[in-house]
Amino acid sequence: MTIFDGEKLIRTLKQEVPKDNGVHYWTWNLDEKGITRPSKSISKSKREPSGVQVLPGIYNVVLQYGNLYSESIVTVKNDPRLDLNLEDQRSKYNTLKQLEKFQEAAAKGTKQLVPGVDLDHDFAPTYEVDSGKKKTVTELRKLAKGARDIWFATDLDREGEAIAWHLAEELKVDPNSAKRVTFDAITKSDVQRAFQNPRGIDMARVEAQQARRIVDRIVGYQVSPILWKKVASGLSAGRVQSVAARLVVEREQQIRAFTPDESWEISGCLSFDVTAAGQLHTDWTSFMAERDDRGRPPIVRQRMAWLADRRSLSAELVEVGGKPLKIHADKASADDLVDAAVTAAEAAGLLDVEIDRQTDPDGKGRAQQTVMVRGRPDPAARYAVVAIDVTRTKSKPYPPFITSTLQQAASSRLGMSTDRTMRVAQQLYEGIDLPGEGRVGLITYMRTDSTNLSGEAISMARRYLEEKLGKDYLPEKPRFYSSTNQSAQEAHEAIRPTDPFREPDAIAAALTEEQLRLYRLIWQSFVGCQATDAEWDSTAVRMQRTDRDTGAIFKTNGRVLRFDGCLKITGIPKADGDQVLPDFEKGTELAPFSIDPRQKFQAPPPRYTEASLVKKLEEEGIGRPSTYASIINVIENRGYVEQRERRFYATALGEAVTEFLEEGFHDQFIEVGYTREIEQELDQVAQGSKPWTEMLHEFYGELVPKLESAAELPHKKAESTPSQYACPECGRRLDYRLGKTGRFLSCSGYNEKVLEEAPPPKPTAKGKKPRARKPKEVPACSYAMPVDRDGRPLLPEQIDLLSPNGVAMVKRTGRYGDFLVEDLPRPPKKAGKKSDDDAPAPFILNLDKKGNIKFPAPPPIVTDISCPKCDNVMNLRDGKRGPWLGCRAFPKCRGRAAFSKLSEDEQQELRRQLTEHLQGQQELVLTRRDGTTRVGDGTPVADLTIDGGVAELPLFGE
C-alpha cells in the first residue's frame, strides 16, 4: 500500500500475503506519525499505531496485490465531536514537556502546609502557602486570569487529588466544576483520553488525605514532646513510623531471646566412576578448603558445577536400617545426639571417626556445645540406584508489579533502596527523551496497590509474545490477576511499560544505568506475566548401599528445564540447590568419596531487609504504596534502626522509644492492628462512607487519655544501668545512660551535685556597686563515652585531617548535627571549679547535609546600611550569585536588602571593598595527618574517617 499527498509519496506499507484463502481485512489508522513522513522500513506490526490526532486533507491510497491494483481517494476531516480544533489538540500533546514543567511548578508552589489544627472546632486546619513559593502562586494566578480553561492534571493518588484542590483554592476555581484529569501513563493516547473525560475534584479523596495529614500531625505534635521529656530531646513519634520501628524492635527481641533446636544431617558425594573415588576424595577435600578474597568457601553453585564436571552428585542420607533418618532434639532436651549421628555415618560408610567438641561462649542452649565429626569414606563402599522418579512440574509467572513488589524485587535483585527505586520509577513515569520520539512516558503510575491490567495492556502483551516469540509462548487465554490487598484500587493499573514493543535494549542509549535496570525489571515482569508456564522435569533418585546390609539410603534431586515459557522473558532463576544429573539407569553403581555429618542449629527469625520490611508493612496494612519508602527513611534517619549488610538492626534508642510508646500507648497508634484500622477508616473517608471529622473525633478522643497517662510515666532518660567500668577521671562507676543518639557511658558522679565556685562579679558602670554572683550546682563529674552495640566503650572515630594549627581533628555531634573539632586535651577540672576560661577556642569545621567538609566563609564586611527590619546595620557577603546584604543581628533578625537596588556608585564602592577584603583573607590549608596531602572544601568526611576502636577502661572495684 502506498499513500500519496498529491504527487508526493509519503507512506509505504508492506505486509506478507495471507496464507489462507478468503476475505481479509487490513486496517490502517491515519495518525500524526503515519501520515507526515514515509516509512523507512517494513513495519513488523500487523497494524499501524492509532490516535485521534489526524491531519486533515485528501490522500490517494494505492493497494497492489500481485498483479491486482486498486486506487482510492481518502478524505480526512476534523472530528466534530472534539471541543478544540485540531491545531489546539496537537499543540496540547506536543507541548506535553512544557505542561509537565508547569504541573511540577504548580504542585511545588501550592502544596500547602498544615501549621495548625483547631482541635476545638472540628479539627479545622490552617493552611498557608510555602513562603518561598508565593511568587510562583502569583504567576499562576496571572496565568489563570487569561486562560479559557484550567486543567488539573496532578498525580492520580489521594495526595495528587489534594494538590489539585489546593491549586483550585488558590486559583479561585470551584472544585466541583474544575476540570480534573488523571492518567496512568504519560503517553499520547492516555493524555488525550484523560483530557476528553475531565471530572470534578473528588472531595472525598481530598478529605481522606487531609484527615491523614491531621492525624499524623496530632501524633507528631502531641506525642513527640512527651518523648523529649521522658526519653531524650530531639526525638519524634509518628503514627506509622513508630509501628514500623516496633516491627524491627520486636524482631530484634525475638532474635535475642531465641534458643535453637539441634539436628544432624549427613550428606554424601558419590561418583559414577567407582575407580576414581579415592582420588576424588583428595581433590574434593582440597577444593572445599579453598577460600575467596573474602574468606568464603565455595558456594553451592560452584560445588554443583565441580561435581557435574566429574560425573558425580551430592545426596542426603534419608534412611538407615529401614527407618527414616531423623536426628533431632529440641532446646529443652538434654539428649546427646553425637552417638546417633556417628552410628548413622558409619552405616553410610564412614571410617576412622574422630569427634571434636568445642564450647561456644556466645551460643545459647544446645548451641553452646559445637561438635565436628570427621572421618574418611570406606573405599569398599558401594551404592546402587534403586529408584528413579521423574515428574513434570510447571512454573507460573508472577503477577505484574505493584509498588511493594517492585520495591522488593529492586531491593533483592538490583540492590536498590526503596527510596531510590521510587525516584528512578518517577523518572520513567514522567518521561525520557527518546531519539525521534521526544519525551515519552515509559511506565504507568508507580504508586499502586492493584495488579489489575487493562484489556488494552493485555492485548499489547499478547501481541508482542505472538509476534516476537511465537504461539508457543502465548497462553490460550489471557491471564488476569486479582489483588490480594482488599483495599487495592482496581481502577488503577499495575506498574507496566506503556508499550511492550519498546524493548529495554532498543532504548538503552537514552537511559541511565539505573533507569535501564529498573525499566528492564518492569518490562520483564509485565510481558512475562502474560506468557505460558515454564515446564521442568524434576528427578528424584534413591541409592542404597550394597556392599554391606546397613540399609543406608541416599536421596538426591535434580531438575531440568524442558520449556522456558515465561522464563524466556523474566530469566531462569538461579536455584543453588538444583543439580544437573548425568544419564544413568536403575541398578547403576556408585562409590562415595565424601561422607559429611553436620551438626545444625535452628536459625532465629531472619532480620528484616528493605524488601521484607515493605512486604510486612503491606501484609499488616500499614501505610500505603506512596509511603513505604518514606517510612523506612524516617526510622533510619531518626536513629531508631540501622542497616548493616542490608539488614535492619534495632538501636538502643529505637528499643527505648518503642518500649516507652508500648507502655504509654499500648492499645493506640503503636499497635499494628490499630494502625491497620486507621488506614481502613481513611479508605472509608475516601469512598465517601464516613465523614472525616467523625473519624478524627474518634481518634483524638481515644488518644487524649493516653497522652495524660504517658506524661506520668517514669523518665527513661533518668534511668541508668551500672557497668563494669570505672571513670578514668574520678574513679567512680560508669553507668549506661540513654541520649538522643543512643546509649552511652556516663560517670555516676553526674547525678552528684556540687557547688561551683562563684565567678567574679560582672563589671558595672561607674558609681554602681558590683552585683555578687551566686554559685550554682553542677555535676561532680561529666565524663561520658560512646559505646558499641555490645556496650563496649569506643574511642572517638579518628579523622585523617589536621587543623591549620597542626592538631588532629575528631568528629563530634552537637545540637545542629555533626562537626569536626581539634582534639585538644581536656583542661584539668576540680570538683566545684570551672575550667580555664582563657583556654584558646578550638578550630571547628562544619559539615553540610551530605556529610561533606564545609570550609568557613570569610568574615563579612560591616556596612553603614540600615536593616529594613530592625535598628542594626547590614553585613556584606559574597555569595554564589554575587554580593548580598543581611542583617548583622542574624539569626535574631533575618532582614535582607537588595544589593541591586543600591545606587551604581554604592554598588561599585562596596564591590571594591569586598574584593580587597577577600584578597586579604589567608587561604585555608588543610592536610591529612601525613602533613602533605591537601584536603579541599567539599571532601566527604567518610573518606577521612578512621575507626577509633574499643577503648580500654579500668574495671570498677579493681
Image (cartoon, rainbow, N blue to C red):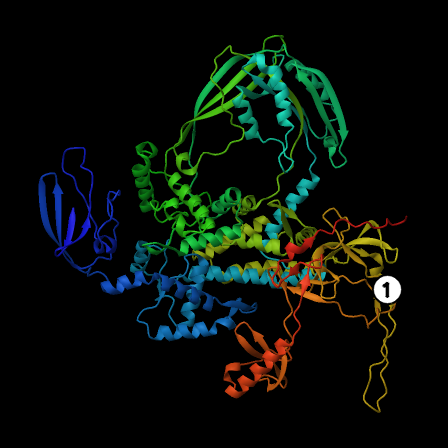
791 is higher (above) or lower (below) than 19:
below
**Residue at figure coordinates x 86%, y 63% from the top left:** 780
Give the residue displayed 76% in from the left and 61% down from the top.
823
Residue 252 in picture, x, y percent from top left: 66, 44
Residue at 68%, 63% in the rendered image: 926
Measuring from the top left, give residue 155's x and y in whole percent.
42, 58
- Residue 956 lies, in percent from the top left, at 87, 50
Task: Give left or right: position of 873 versus 573.
Answer: right
> Where 739 falls versus 281 (above or below)?
below
Task: Please give left or right for residue 682 compared with residue 822 in the image.
Answer: left
Q: Could you tell me which secondary element the residue under label 1 belongs to?
A: loop
Going by the numbered disc 1, the residue's amino acid type is: Pro
For the residue pair 809 and 957, the one nearer the viewer reads as 809
- Quarter of the image holding residue 661? bottom right
Against 473, residue 375 (above or below) is above
Rendering quarter of residue 324: top right
Q: Nearer the viewer, residue 951 or 159?
A: 951
Tag 1 residue: 828
Q: Which residue is pictured at 52% across the width and 18% down the height? A: 541
Q: Residue furthest right?
A: 958
Q: Quadrant of residue 345?
A: top right
| Res 152 seen here | no
Q: Give the x, y percent position of residue 725.
A: 83, 50
Q: Is 510 displayed left or right of 892 in the figure?
A: left
Regarding residue 376, the answer to whether it shows in the image is yes
Residue at the extreme front? 932
